[in-house]
Image (tube, helix red, strand yellow):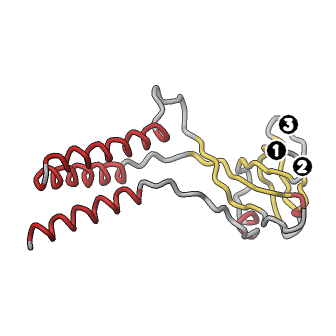
Amino acid sequence: MVRYVVRATALALCAVTMLSAAPATAAGHRDWSVVTRIDTGTRIAVYGTRRSRPDACDFLSADEISITCTAVDSSTRMVFPRATVREVTVFEEEHDYHIGTWIAAGISIGLVAAACVLNPLGGVMVGAMLLGGWSAWADMHVQFPPPPGPRIRRHVVYRAPISATP
């Protein structure tokens, strides 16, 4: 009975670990009020409905009608009517928190150890799955050598609803 409980627990932990490693898709935001609360001077990118490339600018203000900002390479003032805005992203400095990585590594080592105690072949299989998951994670998140300066990420703050009519 105890062996069954240990196996079920190890299997449940393995399933949770594998499911938590699945990539999540960002749905974006549909709330325009988030755009109106962006700090003045924040670097943003505005994707318009008529252009495939974004316009990068420094945020000045936004209201229910439009976004106003200045172009990055000049002091040209740009105004984007809300009806023409498809997406707004904010450029943020990416923080590098390692605590989650270390927790996941500890859980992985514990799972492999538990699987090896129960069945050496099972331990090898669980270890191979976790090694594959860690390899995929590192491929997406680790750059070697690290780029100079702060790492910047783009964070979507607004995405216009997709209209039903073309």
> Mark 3 and mark 1: span between their CA atoms?
13 Å
Q: Which mark is in front, 1 or 2?
A: 1
- Measuring from the top left, give residue 84's x and y in whole percent: 89, 58
Q: Is residue 127 above or below residue 115?
A: above
Identify the amino acid type marked 1.
Asp
Q: Secondary structure at mark 3?
A: loop
Residue designated by label 1: 55
Upstream in the sequence, badge 3 or badge 1?
A: 1
Identify the amino acid type marked 3.
Ser
- Measuring from the top left, give residue 140's x and y in whole percent: 49, 40
Q: Is residue 51 left or right of residue 118?
A: right
> Mark 3 and mark 2: span between their CA atoms?
11 Å
Residue designated by label 3: 74
Q: Is residue 28 left or right of residue 51?
A: left
Q: Which mark is in front, 3 or 1?
A: 1
Which residue is situated farthest in the top direction here? 145
Residue at the image position 68 percent from the left and 65 percent from the top:
29
Residue designated by label 2: 78
Upstream in the sequence, badge 1 or badge 2?
A: 1
Residue at the image position 80 percent from the left and 50 percent from the top:
47
Q: Is residue 40 above or below residue 4?
A: above
Q: Is residue 27 left or right of residue 135?
A: right
| Dot 2 crowding, Cα within 10 Å, few <14, some 14–19, many 20+ | some
Q: Secondary structure at mark 2?
A: strand
Q: Quadrant of residue 157?
A: bottom right
Residue at the image position 15 percent from the left and 71 percent from the top:
5
- Measuring from the top left, give residue 48's x and y in whole percent: 85, 52
Q: Nearer the viewer, residue 78 or 113?
A: 113
| Dot 1 crowding, Cα within 10 Å, few <14, some 14–19, many 20+ | some
Callouts 1 and 2 close, C-beta under 8 Å: yes
